[in-house]
Image (cartoon, rainbow, N blue to C red):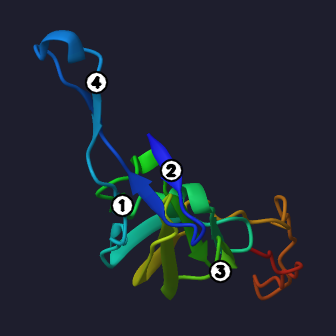
Amino acid sequence: MRITSVLTKVFICAIFSLCGLGSNDSLLHAQPCSPDNTAPQLTAADTTLTVPASTDCLATIDQANLLGTISVTDNCSAEADITVISTPTALTNVPSGDYTVIWSATDQAGNVAIVSQTITLVVTDNTDPTISGMPTAIALDADANCEAVATWTEPTA
């Protein structure tokens, strides 16, 4: 049972039915409530992520992929009920390098845990280069000294 006080703290209460007391079988006993004052346990170990580069040799990692690098638990709230936020929320169009992400986890009682994580991003270029402007076959006539000069536009990559 969830009871919220005026101070917005969540109290967890257990209610038990006492049986075998003769005419008092339906008597309910409430265990004293205790507030949840314990922050979630948030773990965000430094990690390396290797991602393919976009056409401009940069990468983007959204929060869903960043979330895979952390774990969070709480003594009262289920993992699905813990709000996790990262700052920044994503790494957008960034090159290889080290990036700091600040994580905060808030449980249902409003207790907050904050940790810092270094993500080493390795952006890999998986795209083969292309060469354009290659000259077609060049046919030349040699001069009297058996020499010829060929010219063409230099190809680009």
**Which residue shows up at 82% across the image and 81% down it?**
154
3D distance between C-alphas at marks 2 and 3 = 46 Å
Of badges 3 and 1, the one in the foreground is 1
Of badges 1 and 2, the one in the foreground is 2
What amino acid type is highlighted by mark number 4? Leu
Rendered image: mark on residue 27: 4
3D distance between C-alphas at marks 1 and 4 = 39 Å
Rendered image: mark on residue 72: 1
**Which residue shows up at 60% across the image and 67% down it?**
6
Q: Which percent across, then down, holds residue 50?
A: 44, 66
Q: Earlier in the sequence, mark 3 or mark 1?
A: 1
Which residue is tagged 2? 3
- Asked if disc 1 and disc 4 are in contact, CB closer than 8 Å, the reply is no
Q: Earlier in the sequence, mark 1 or mark 4?
A: 4
Most foreground residue, 80 or 68: 80
What amino acid type is highlighted by mark number 3? Val
- Asked if disc 1 and disc 2 are in contact, CB closer than 8 Å, the reply is no
Q: Is residue 149 above or below residue 25?
A: below
Mark 4 secondary-structure assignment: loop
Of badges 4 and 3, the one in the foreground is 4
Total count of labels: 4
What amino acid type is highlighted by mark number 1? Val
Can residue 125 be seen in this snapshot?
no
